[in-house]
């Protein structure tokens, strides 16, 4: 991990926890990370954003949504805007998660949502990653090149440090199958090289996501280009997530 970029550990709760359950989680988690060196982001469902923002307000952790609309406002039933998540206490949002892409979210939509977040002073966590079939066919680098270029197409060079990228191999998400530290480093180094074509890549944090646990987190985050982790299931338990945060040091 570069000494220039402060590590970031983000927890994506996916569709788990009511606001009341989130408040209990925050009460347990906050004392476990007091003084932690890493930056921490917690990504609850929309309905728990304000509860988590309140529960973590006295810590160095910040809150991010799991998605955001590319639209500013209007007749978009079921969508939630950047202004709305900001009003609920969020300071950023995940965009382009593979579970969203599987439902039809395109690189163009991801780019528009990234732009919308930046326009509102919010931090995008932009996800990219290949499928098992693509990796086995030797297409990982080609796929990542296209995804990275397209998904960050609307980011200006001077905004580079405001954007976080998360490399999540789809074959490792929620499967218990984790990329080795060497696989993660090679893929993330490639992502950084693609970013460097147009942006200030050395200033950009790139996270690894995909079955991160307290047992493998330290080895993954020790890699030169890995600046932290986007954690799924392991973030649902405050003790386990806190252990991953501590591992980032």
Image (cartoon, rainbow, N blue to C red):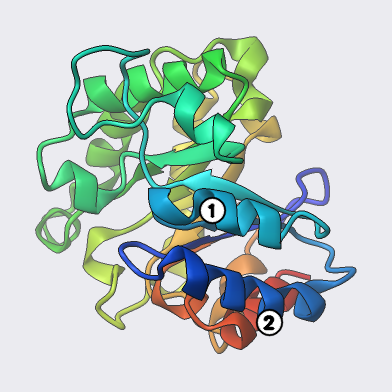
- In the rendered view, tell whether residue 164 sits above or below residue 63: above
Q: Could you tell whether 120 is left or right of 101 in the image?
A: right
> Image quadrant of residue 136?
bottom left
- Indicate the position of residue 88 as horizontal and vertical percent values: 55, 39
- In the rendered view, tell whether residue 110 sits above or below residue 96: above
Q: Residue furthest front?
A: 20
Which quadrant is home to the C terminus? bottom right
Dot 1 or dot 2: first in sequence order is 2
Label 2 near label 1: C-beta < 8 Å? no
Q: Which residue is mark 1?
A: 207
Of 84 and 207, which appears nearest the observer?
84
Instruction: Describe the element under mark 2 as helix, strand or loop.
Output: helix
Q: Could you tell whether 15 is left or right of 224 in the image?
A: left
- In the rendered view, tell whether residue 177 sits above or below residue 198: below
At horizontal 76% and vertical 60% (from top left) the residue drawn is 38
At horizontal 68% and vertical 82% (from top left) the residue drawn is 28
- Indicate the position of residue 144 as horizontal and vertical percent values: 30, 39
> Image quadrant of residue 111?
top left
- Counting other residues with Cα less than 10 Å from the Cα at mark 1, is it few (<14), some (14-19), or many (20 or more)? many
- Indicate the position of residue 9 as horizontal and vertical percent values: 62, 60
Tell me if I can see residue 226 in this picture.
no
Q: Could you tell whether 48 is left or right of 139 in the image?
A: right
Instruction: Describe the element under mark 1 as helix, strand or loop.
Output: strand
> What is the CA distance from the residue labelled 1 to the residue labelled 2?
25 Å
Disc number at residue 59? none
Of 224 and 12, which appears nearest the observer?
12
- Indicate the position of residue 96 as horizontal and vertical percent values: 31, 39
Q: Which residue is mark 2?
A: 28
């Amino acid at each position: 991990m570069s000494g220039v970029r402060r590590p970031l550990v983000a927890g994506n709760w996916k569709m788990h926890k009511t606001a009341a359950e989130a408040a209990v989680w925050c009460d347990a988690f906050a004392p476990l990370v007091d003084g932690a060196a890493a930056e921490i982001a917690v990504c609850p469902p929309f309905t728990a954003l304000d509860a988590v923002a309140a529960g973590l307000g006295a810590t160095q952790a910040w809150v991010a949504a799991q998605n955001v609309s590319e639209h500013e406002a209007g007749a978009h039933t079921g969508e939630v805007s950047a202004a709305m998540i900001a009003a609920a206490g969020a300071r950023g949002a995940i965009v382009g998660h593979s579970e969203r892409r599987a439902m039809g979210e395109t690189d163009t939509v991801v780019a528009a949502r990234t732009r919308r977040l930046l326009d509102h002073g919010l931090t995008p966590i932009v996800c990219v990653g290949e499928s098992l079939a693509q990796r086995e066919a030797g297409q990982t680098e080609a796929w990542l090149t296209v995804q990275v270029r397209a998904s960050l197409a609307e980011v200006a060079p001077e905004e580079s440090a405001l954007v976080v990228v998360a490399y999540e191999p789809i074959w490792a998400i929620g499967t218990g199958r984790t990329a080795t530290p060497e696989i993660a480093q090679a893929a993330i180094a490639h992502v950084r090289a693609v970013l460097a074509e147009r942006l200030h890549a050395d200033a950009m944090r790139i996270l690894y996501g995909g079955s991160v646990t307290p047992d493998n987190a330290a080895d993954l985050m020790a890699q030169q280009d890995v600046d932290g982790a986007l954690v799924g299931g392991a973030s649902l338990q405050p003790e386990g997530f806190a252990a991953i945060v501590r591992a980032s040091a």
